[in-house]
Image (cartoon, grey):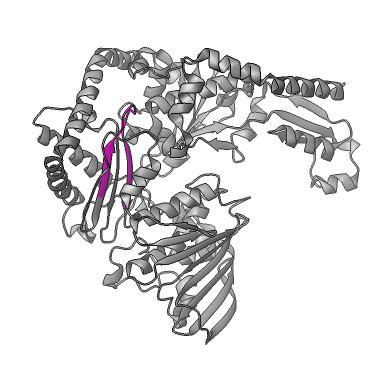
Amino acid sequence: MEHVRTRPGMYIGKLGDGSHAEDGIYVLLKEVIDNSIDEFKMNAGKRIEVTIDEHLRVTIRDYGRGIPLGKLVDAVSVLNTGGKYDSKAFKKSVGLNGVGLKAVNALSSHFVAQSFRDGETHRAEFECGQLVKDEGIQKNPEENGTLVCFEPDNTLFKNYLFRNEFVEVMLRNYTYLNTGLTIMFNGRRILSRNGLEDLLTDTMTTQPLYPIVHLKGEDIEIAFTHTNGQYGEEYYSFVNGQHTTQGGTHQSAFKKYIAETIKDFSGKNFDYSDIRNGIVAAISINIQEPLFESQTKIKLGSLSTEPNGAGISIDKFIGDFVKEQVDNYLRRNPDVAEIILQKIGESERERKAMAGVAKLARERSKKANLHNRKLRDCKIHFNDPKGDRQEDSCIFITEGDSASGSITKSRDVMTQAVFSLRGKPLNCFGLTKKVVYENEEFNLLQAALNIEDGLDGLRYNKVIVATDADVDGMHIRLLMITFFLQFFPELIKKGHVYILQTPLFRVRQRRKKLSRARLEAIGEADTKGDFITRYCYSEEERLQNIEALGPEPEITRFKGLGEISPDEFRGFIGEDIRLEQVSLHKSDQVAELLEYYMGKNTIERQNFIIDNLVIEEDRAEEEEEEHEYKE
């Protein structure tokens, strides 16, 4: 258990504070729920209750068979103990490594496990993995099942908070993959009646061209449709209930065979990219002892359906199912087949129309010496051949030489790259993908990200838009988001796009102006230096720090990234970096938003601005008052 605490990355991947879906606190949550899901698959308990108090403390209660009472303490505190190793009942479980609950226990400041079985219960409490209270076996009439309560250790997961939006996505995925399961999340019911079909229905942000095709077999389930007005491909893949966000061998096989089957059905020599353009699909498989490329289990590495190469290959398993079932479906539903072939024809015509432009653009991006002219790349791609730290890689998209210069001098050259825009990018709303190749900025950015053929080749886990905190910076930010929404929506849907939050103000006070009592109150009694400095990301933070550091502190308003010195900037893009993830949900009404704000209805927007000018007038008054305050 001590090894888990000293090497948490080996067991749960990164730590984090919960601001990103891949942070460790969500892995802890998943490890506990996985055990409850295994009970559901054994037809033991159809309900799981998940409660998160104040975004800090998690309680999970299932109604399965309950951990054997005499084995409770060992099951949650002694590594490599558990009942899944030789049990055929769990041969297609995710949690086979015997570590899950133990890791949660070791990495929690407070952990409680309680089992209910046949009118008896056993409850044990731990702190940082160490047993502090064992109540022994007692009589209890509650329903069979297991209760786990844990609070991640704040010394490891600094300032963490569980975000409901990430938790809800995780729980909904569990219900899509386990129809008949009900999950209560903070009193709200989550369930699915149609599996992967519901997943696509709930997540698609554009209208499908035909009803979702939903096919199920033994240990495999797929769903797919094509959408109109969307470029690229979008996939959701799962193995034994685990959401493999980075795909793997199963997703690659599905992509290959869905295109091959439709091509064979059509009898035409369609290009695979045209067949899959606009597709939205999901695949779920169950195999024995899956091998993942990391402990966080987000990319499948297994080549076979059984351990040690036994069984059949993943490729053949998926290929046989897709070729038979999809071909049968298309023959039974000629109207759907016709719509698919029309969509493919449109994609083919558009691709051929811009083929020459695309070829010239690719050549131009190479001749432009991209890495020296526009992109200051990071070294991780060359120094990390196994990809162990690829999830740490990011690229800052900045505007102008001053901003890119500040970030370039401040960045971590191993994991952080910088791409410099020249002025404002083009408003690409309503344009075809041809503009991506004709516009030098877009063409070079696409080449830098390596996403021309989809996200499989994406070179950076985080694409961070870093613009000035003024009107022009906001405009550039919106133009970049429009570009991604128009041509690479999956980049946003998969959670790769972020906005860099940079401070608006610096508030600082000379130490000698503050009393010892005031220094102790603000936690600066034992620090050194002539100034106490606070960086403020909002007007509210500015006012709070003025009050805390009074009287008459020095206030600086940062108007551009280039104004912030590299030494200061290093703090804003280091461990304490503040990122706002750009999300995309069905309820966002993206088409309507883009049409209104980025379309050609200039007069309508102009009237909106006129009707809301009072907001700007109020802001002007506030700035005048701020100036008077400084004087």
Q: Is residue 136 magenta?
A: no
The answer to whether residue 72 is left or right of residue 180 is right
Q: Quadrant of the C terminus?
A: top right
Compared with residue 30, is residue 413 higher up or lower down, i.e. above or below?
above
Residue with the most extreme left position: 267
Q: Which residues are magenta?
A: 222-238
327 is higher (above) or lower (below) than 623: below
Residue at the spot 36% in from the left edge and 43% down from the top edge: 201
Apparent side of residue 220 relative to residue 582 in the rendered image (left or right): left
Would residue 460 be seen by someone viewing this image from the given angle?
no
Expressed as whole percent of the image width and height from the top left, the position of residue 48 reads: 45, 65
Q: Nearer the viewer, residue 542 or 54?
A: 54
**631 shown above or below 232:** above
| Residue 455 coordinates in the image, percent (x, y) | 35, 34
**Residue 123 percent location from the top left of the image:** 54, 78
Using the rendered image of the protein, determine whether residue 102 is visible from the camera's viewpoint. yes
Of residue 218 and residue 28, the one placed in the foreground of this image is: 218
